[in-house]
Image (cartoon, rainbow, N blue to C red):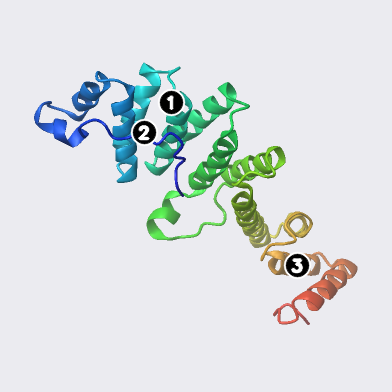
Amino acid sequence: MRFINKTGIAVISASLLALGGCTSSEDEQIQAVANSGIQPLYADARDSMSVGNFAQATQILSLIDSKYPFGPHSHQVQLDLIYSYYKGGNPDQAIATIDRFVRLNPNHADVDYAYFMRGVTNMELDNNLFQSLLGVDRDDRDPSKSKEAFEDFRRLIQKYPNSKYAADARERMLHIKTRLAKYEIAVARFYMRRQAYVAAANRGRYVIENFPDTSQVQQALEVMVASYDQLNLTELKENTMRTLRLNYPDSEFIE
């Protein structure tokens, strides 16, 4: 994902690297550049972003934001700060910056980007430690951040249907729906193991009703068939089996 580049300020200052021999710490380097004015400071922040040094970029951009809160590039600085926080692995800071930007600039031309990045950041927050470090897909993990992301993308599409981020947001919403459907199936199987068949069947029906365009419909129907069988609800079982047979003839649940 690229960050927005509207201002195109030329690099007119020496890089922070060149300051290394004159100061004793990175913070002192940043302060030294800050004293020279906003344009060279912002140019160095963009340089840091371009080479993927988002930790340094966020430091510089934060300094600009606090030192020049109403400067000519203040809005762009905040948008760059959102992206740098996200790419630098600081999603909570990214969300806080997004919310501040939207609250203070509800009619800004790039507020759709802020909504989009809120959704993207919440999707990132949904990744847990096991999944990110071990490649384990934990379908039963808390889906609250995915739900927030879905609402962020829904709000973007509702408010700005012609946004250049709308198509991407729709694709991400489909991914999130699959994630939420998988969670419901995981919970349904949990109930099955504990012989809570009514609760399991209800979870399966919830998937059918709310996520009919996901890959989890077959499993939802199978959960319902198994639950109704355990509950001796013959008519409900047969009706569900008919739907399963029609749509998924290779299912092992088909009698």
| Mark 1: few/some/many CA within 10 Å (<14, 14-19, 20+) | some
What numbered label is drawn on residue 221?
Answer: 3
Is 80 rendered above or below residue 181?
A: above
Residue 125 seen in the current view: yes
Amino acid type at mark 3: Leu
Q: Earlier in the sequence, mark 2 or mark 1?
A: 2
Q: Secondary structure at mark 1?
A: loop
Is 190 rendered above or below residue 236?
A: above
Query: Which residue is painted at 83% across and 69% down in the image?
Result: 240
Find residue 194 and report its image quarter. Answer: bottom right
Residue assigned mark 1: 73
Quadrant showing the C terminus:
bottom right
Question: Alpha carbon of mark 2 to alpha carbon of mark 1: how far?
Answer: 10 Å
Q: Earlier in the sequence, mark 2 or mark 3?
A: 2
Mark in the foreground, 2 or 1: 2
Query: Which residue is painted at 45% across and 42% down in the image?
Result: 3
Residue assigned mark 2: 9
Amino acid type at mark 1: His
Q: Are marks 2 and 3 in contact (CB under 8 Å)?
A: no
Question: Which one is nearer the viewer's eye here, 61 or 40?
Answer: 40
Tell me where residue 135 appears, x and y as whole percent: 42, 60
Mark in the foreground, 1 or 3: 1
Mark in the foreground, 2 or 3: 2
Amino acid type at mark 2: Ile
Tell me where residue 201 appears, x and y as whole percent: 76, 59
Tell me where residue 116 appears, x and y as whole percent: 57, 42
Residue 54 seen in the current view: no
